[in-house]
Image: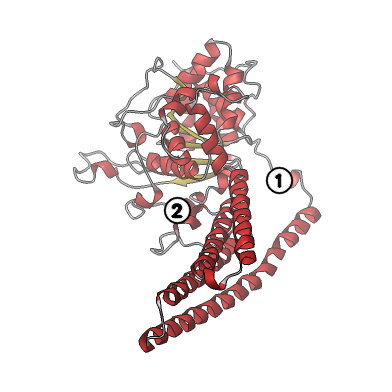
C-alpha cells in the first residue's frame, strides 16, 4: 500500500512539499518599470541586424573577386602564359577567397542566430550541422579556426613564391601564423571542449579531480536489448552494480571528448534528433522540439517533461537531447526512475545522500526515464522528490512519463509529494506532449489495445 505521509524532513533533503497552487509569479519579484527597461535594452539587439546585412554585401564582393581571379587563371592557361608556380598561386588565391567567404557566412548566420534572433530552419534539408548547437563559445572557436586556416594559405603562398618573398616577410608571416595558432588553442581550451578532453585523459590515468570525482558513482549502462520507453524492462534490480567515474573514464579512453561523454552517460542505444520520425506522431509540437535541440534549456537550468503513450518516442527524444548535450561539451547521466531510486536509496542507507545529490551538480543534465510504468514505494517517491528539489534551479532534468501530470499522485502514491514534485519540475520547464500509436508495433497492428491520450 502506498503511504500517504508527506515527505519526511530528512537532513539530506531539506526542501519539503509546498501546498497546492504555490507556483511563483515573476510579477511578485519585479516591478513593471524595471521589466520594461529590460525589454527595451533587449530590443536594442536589432541594431546589429543591419551590420550582418552589410556583411552579406561583402560576401557579394568576394563572389565577384573569386570569379574575376578564376577568369584570369583560365585566360593565362589558354594563352600558355601560366607555369606551374603561377597556377598553384592562383589556386591558393581562390582557396583564400573561399575560406574568407566561409568565415563571413559563419559570422553572418552564427552571429545573427547568437546575438540577434533565432533562425528556425528545423526540417530544412540544407540546415548546417553546426547551427543546431551554435553558441558564443562554439562560434568563437570556429571563427578562430577559420582565421588560422586563412593564415595557413597566406603562409603557403609565401613559400610557394619564395623567390619573390623577402626573408623579413617570411619570418614575420611565420611568427604571426604561430601566434594565431596559439591564440586559437587558448580560446578553444577556455571555451570548454579541450578542457573536457583533458579531464577525460586524466581519468584514463587513474586520477580523480579535486572535487571528489573519483568517489561519485554512475548509473550502470543499459544492455543493448533495452527498448525505448522501458516497457519491457520492468523494474531495475536495486542491486545493479555501479561503477566509479574513474573506471567509466578508463573504459572510454581512446575516443574523443564527446564520444567519452556519450559512453559515460549510459544511454540505452544511439539516438539522434535527425533520426526521429516527426511525421509519425498524431500530435507533436515540432517547433518546441527543434528549439530544445539548441540546448538553451541546459544553460538556463530548465527542465523538459516528455509525456505520451508507450512507443511514441519519448526516450528517443530524451536520448537525442542528451547526446547533443554531450556533443556540446556537457556531462549527462541517463537512468530509469527505478535506477535513480536504487542509487539514492543506497546513498541514503550509507548516510551520504546529501553528498550524492551535491555530487550530481557537476552534471548539467540528468535524464529520468520511464516514470509511471509502475508505482513507486513511499521511500522511492520521497527520494525522487529529493532529486527534483535539489536540482531545482541548479541543473536540468529531462523526465519521460506515460502518465499525465494529473495522474502522478497515483505513481508517487501521495498527492502532497506529487504536487511538490510537479511544482518544482514544471516551474521552469518545457512540456512536450506526444500523441500517437506505438511506433514499435506499427507493423503488427494494435492487438486490440487503444493508444491512450496523455494530457
Instruction: State the SS at label 2.
Output: loop
Q: CA distance from mark 2 to mark 1?
A: 26 Å
What kind of element bears circle 1?
helix
* Quadrant assignment for the C terminus: top left
| Res. 266 in view | yes
Image point (62%, 15%), residue name: 10
Residue drawn at point x = 50 percent, y = 22 percent: 206
Snapshot quadrant of residue 113:
bottom right
Horizontal and vertical percent position of residue 236: 37, 22
Q: Number of callouts in the render?
A: 2
In the image, taking residue 57 as reference, residue 408 lies left or right, namely left
Q: Mark number for residue 285?
A: 2
Residue 347 appears left or right of 48: left
Tag 2–tag 1 contact (CB < 8 Å): no
| Residue holding disc 1 | 26
Q: Is residue 169 above or below residue 276?
A: below
What's the mark number on residue 191?
none
Quadrant position of the N terminus in the picture: top left
**Residue situated in front as seen by the camera: 164 or 60:** 164
Which residue is drawn at the image coordinates 44% and 31% (left, top)?
Answer: 264
- Please tell me which residue is depicted at 60% across the width and 42% down the height of the picture: 428
Task: Decide if residue 215 is on the left or right side of residue 74.
Answer: right
Tell me if mark 1 has few (under 14), some (14-19) or many (20+) residues whose alpha carbon lies within 10 angstroms of its own: few
Q: Where 3 falls versus 21 (above or below)? A: above
The first of marks 2 and 1 along the sequence is 1
Residue 394: percent from the left, percent from the top?
Answer: 63, 34
Instruction: Using the image as rendered, state which of residue 235 and residue 93 is in the foreground.
Output: 93
Residue found at the very far top of the displayed protein = 350
Q: Label 2: how many residues lie within 10 Å, few (<14), some (14-19) or many (20+)? A: few
Q: Residue 142 sits in which quadrant?
A: bottom right
Q: Nearer the viewer, residue 147 or 235?
A: 147
Amino acid at each position: 500500500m502506498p503511504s500517504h505521509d508527506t515527505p519526511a524532513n530528512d537532513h539530506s533533503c531539506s526542501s519539503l512539499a509546498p501546498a497546492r497552487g504555490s507556483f511563483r509569479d515573476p510579477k511578485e519579484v519585479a516591478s513593471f518599470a524595471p521589466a520594461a527597461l529590460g525589454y527595451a535594452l533587449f530590443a536594442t539587439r536589432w541594431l546589429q541586424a543591419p551590420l550582418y546585412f552589410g556583411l552579406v554585401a561583402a560576401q557579394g564582393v568576394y563572389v565577384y573577386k573569386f570569379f574575376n581571379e578564376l577568369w584570369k587563371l583560365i585566360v593565362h592557361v589558354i594563352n600558355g602564359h601560366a607555369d606551374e608556380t603561377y597556377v598553384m598561386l592562383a589556386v591558393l588565391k581562390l582557396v583564400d577567397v573561399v575560406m574568407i567567404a566561409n568565415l563571413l557566412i559563419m559570422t553572418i548566420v552564427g552571429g545573427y542566430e547568437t546575438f540577434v534572433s533565432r533562425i528556425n530552419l528545423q526540417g530544412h534539408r540544407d540546415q548546417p550541422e553546426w547551427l543546431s548547437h551554435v553558441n558564443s563559445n562554439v562560434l568563437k572557436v570556429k571563427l578562430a579556426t577559420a582565421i588560422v586556416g586563412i593564415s595557413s594559405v597566406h603562409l603557403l603562398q609565401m613559400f610557394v613564391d619564395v623567390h619573390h618573398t623577402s626573408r623579413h616577410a617570411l619570418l614575420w608571416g611565420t611568427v604571426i601564423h604561430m601566434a594565431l595558432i596559439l591564440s586559437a588553442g587558448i580560446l578553444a581550451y577556455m571555451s570548454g571542449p579541450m578542457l573536457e578532453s583533458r579531464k577525460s585523459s586524466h581519468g584514463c590515468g587513474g586520477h580523480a579531480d579535486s572535487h571528489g570525482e573519483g568517489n561519485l558513482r554512475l548509473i550502470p549502462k543499459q544492455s543493448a536489448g533495452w527498448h525505448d520507453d522501458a516497457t519491457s524492462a520492468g523494474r531495475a534490480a536495486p542491486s545493479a552494480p555501479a561503477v566509479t567515474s574513474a573506471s567509466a573514464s578508463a573504459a572510454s579512453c581512446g575516443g574523443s571528448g564527446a564520444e567519452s561523454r556519450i559512453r559515460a552517460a549510459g544511454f540505452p542505444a544511439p539516438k539522434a534528433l535527425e533520426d526521429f520520425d516527426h511525421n509519425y506522431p498524431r500530435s507533436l509540437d515540432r517547433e518546441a522540439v527543434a528549439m530544445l535541440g539548441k540546448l538553451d534549456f541546459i544553460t538556463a537550468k530548465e527542465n523538459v517533461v516528455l509525456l505520451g503513450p508507450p512507443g511514441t518516442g519519448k526516450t528517443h527524444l530524451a536520448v537525442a537531447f542528451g547526446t547533443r548535450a554531450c556533443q556540446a561539451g556537457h556531462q549527462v547521466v541517463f537512468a530509469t526512475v527505478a535506477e535513480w531510486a536504487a542509487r539514492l536509496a543506497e546513498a541514503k542507507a550509507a548516510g551520504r545522500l546529501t553528498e550524492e545529490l551535491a555530487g550530481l551538480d557537476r552534471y548539467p543534465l540528468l535524464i529520468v526515464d520511464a516514470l509511471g510504468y509502475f508505482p513507486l514505494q513511499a521511500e522511492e517517491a520521497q527520494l525522487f522528490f529529493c532529486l527534483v528539489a535539489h536540482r531545482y534551479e541548479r541543473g536540468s532534468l529531462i523526465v519521460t512519463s506515460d502518465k499525465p501530470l494529473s495522474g502522478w499522485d497515483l505513481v508517487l502514491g501521495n498527492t502532497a509529494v506529487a504536487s511538490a514534485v510537479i511544482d518544482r519540475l514544471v516551474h521552469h520547464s518545457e512540456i512536450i506532449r506526444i500523441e500517437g500509436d506505438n511506433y514499435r508495433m506499427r507493423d503488427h497492428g494494435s492487438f486490440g489495445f487503444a493508444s491512450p491520450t496523455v494530457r
